[in-house]
Image (cartoon, coloured by chain):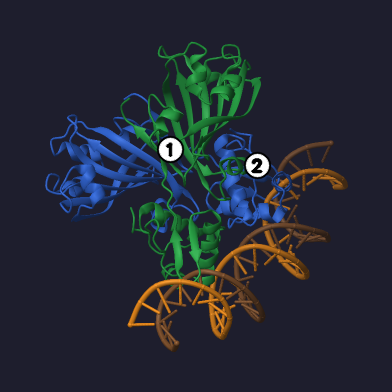
Chain colours: A green, B blue, C brown, D orange
Amino acid sequence: MSGQQAASIERRSGVSLWRQIADRILQGIAAGDFAENAALPPEMALAERYGVNRHTVRSAIAALVQEGVLRAEQGRGTFVLSRKRLSYPIGARTRFSTGLQGQTSERHIALLASSVEPASRRIADALKLARGAAVLRLETRGEADGHPVSRATAWFDARRFAGIDAAMAETGSVTASLRRFGINDYLRQSTVLSARHGDAADLADLDLQPGAIVLVTVAVNVTLDGQPIQFSESRFPAERVELKLSAND
Amino acid sequence: MSGQQAASIERRSGVSLWRQIADRILQGIAAGDFAENAALPPEMALAERYGVNRHTVRSAIAALVQEGVLRAEQGRGTFVLSRKRLSYPIGARTRFSTGLQGQTSERHIALLASSVEPASRRIADALKLARGAAVLRLETRGEADGHPVSRATAWFDARRFAGIDAAMAETGSVTASLRRFGINDYLRQSTVLSARHGDAADLADLDLQPGAIVLVTVAVNVTLDGQPIQFSESRFPAERVELKLSAND
DNA sequence: TATAGTTGTCTATATCAATAGACAAATTTA
DNA sequence: TAAATTTGTCTATTGATATAGACAACTATA
């Protein structure tokens, strides 16, 4: 809960104090401890609150200014720029574009790369294919109002969905692409969720700073009669996206 | 996906190289790149793989030995101790004990603290109470086979559920405690998921090292006719728990 | 227009993090 | 037994991190 954070700065943890303080400030903004568009407490006050030197606080602030979270103005103060976290709904009918409707004015899926490869055991099992069967792998990035909000790797049966990469590149939508293959509706069969630090590729693709956290979902989509059609792993930047799980639908 | 991690060690990120490499090794274990009970590659090989000095790898390994993830034996190698991630199911009927059945031999919820407080706007809204109405806050820790797997803060209507703290302390179960108040079944209405670095209190309660990631769920439970009875925020250690979202029930 | 409060810049010092090289100690293999 | 492999320990050097203090530059306010 907000306000519950005690003196939680850890030394000798392998994470520098300025990065820990930057993370705490981010949390504070997310929790509402630091209001948007308002001034942060002065550097000296923050230094006392966290039990560190003013210069250490300055390093944290400099990093957040660099990330576009804060704006510092000499003589006036340091201000919180407004940036709401997107709420990405996950349920039986999880759709990228539909899910973010109302929160963004524009969104689409960009195809970064695609390739055909033999199915690993994990993927073959999920798609109910023979091990080693050809699968089409799509590397995609979800973008909303020009900002990356997801980075996904998806696998399809290469025989059944030959050319879905071209469809994705053209339409920018999984739903629209599947429709070209006669699939007008599909359901999410399973979702497994975890979190970790983003790796270099994720950080680059999602425009994140080193140390940023990504939410990871591993999901299987099926047709209405339960036939698996898509296996995917998606990474979401935790600082910009939260996942809203819908119990029903 | 596993094996896809490139040279993702970032310098000058505020996160030390040895901590990043320790995290990478943890990921590698989770992803199956490093098999359990088997030897890790030699320190020199890891140093080359990650593009750092052998001593830096040694620092990472030392940290993981300290955390109980690895065991190093002079002359033989460094070995991965077995520790599977628990898979915690989240769905319409999310139950702590039932959900972990089959994965652990023993599990219960320990009551750390409880207090009565006026409902904040967020809690009043979720529980459909008047703002400032008395709510009972329970601080709990979920434990499985003696290891902490969750840390939750839950709020109940203090009038309707007076004494549920004592019931929790006695039964170690939310489901059993609610039964004493005439509630034999309940559903999860909503779950919102996010992730962050654990704060000091979380780290202490969940027995985590600084820098560890926690998965955070904010959920509302309701009776079968839709009456909200519980609002809760739970923190799960990402290195030990994954969340399995069930589409249906 | 002073004055107080705030961010920005500079110097200096101590500790941590990372690299480099050498060799010891223990284990496995030929 | 000898050689090769692997972890453990030591010294030394460099750069990043953190602390400390002083003062400049800028803004808002009395």
Q: Quadrant of residue B222?
A: top left
Image position of B175 with respect to B237: above or below: above
Q: In which chain is the residue bearing label 1?
A: A
The reply, left or right, for residue A168 in relation to residue B86 is right
Q: CA distance from mark 2 to mark 1?
A: 46 Å
> Which is nearer the eye, A213 or A33?
A33
The answer to whether marks 2 and 1 mark residues whose Cβ atoms lie closer than 8 Å is no
Q: Which residue is mark 2?
A: B40
Q: Which residue is mark 1?
A: A104
Q: In which chain is the residue bearing label 2?
A: B
Q: Secondary structure beneath disc 1?
A: loop
Mark 1 residue type: Thr
Q: Residue at x 41, y 34 (%)?
A: A100
x then y, percent, for residue D27: 45, 71
**Circle 1 Cα neighbour tier, 10 Å, few/some/many (<14 / 14–19 / ≥20):** some
> Which is nearer the eye, A73 or B217?
A73
Q: Residue at x 52, y 54 (%)?
A: A68
Image position of A216 with respect to A78: above or below: above
**Residue B169 visible in this rendered orientation of the protein:** no
The reply, left or right, for residue A92 in relation to residue A195 is left
The reply, left or right, for residue A97 in relation to residue C8 is left
The reply, left or right, for residue B7 in relation to residue A29 is right
x then y, percent, for residue B55: 70, 56
Image position of A239 with respect to C17: above or below: above
Quadrant (top left/top right/bottom left/bottom right) for the N terminus of chain B = top right
**Circle 2 Cα neighbour tier, 10 Å, few/some/many (<14 / 14–19 / ≥20):** many
Q: Secondary structure beneath disc 2?
A: loop
> Which is nearer the eye, A102 or A62?
A102
Quadrant (top left/top right/bottom left/bottom right) for the C terminus of chain B = top left
x then y, percent, for residue A232: 52, 27
x then y, percent, for residue A165: 60, 21
Q: Residue at x 56, y 44 (%)?
A: A198
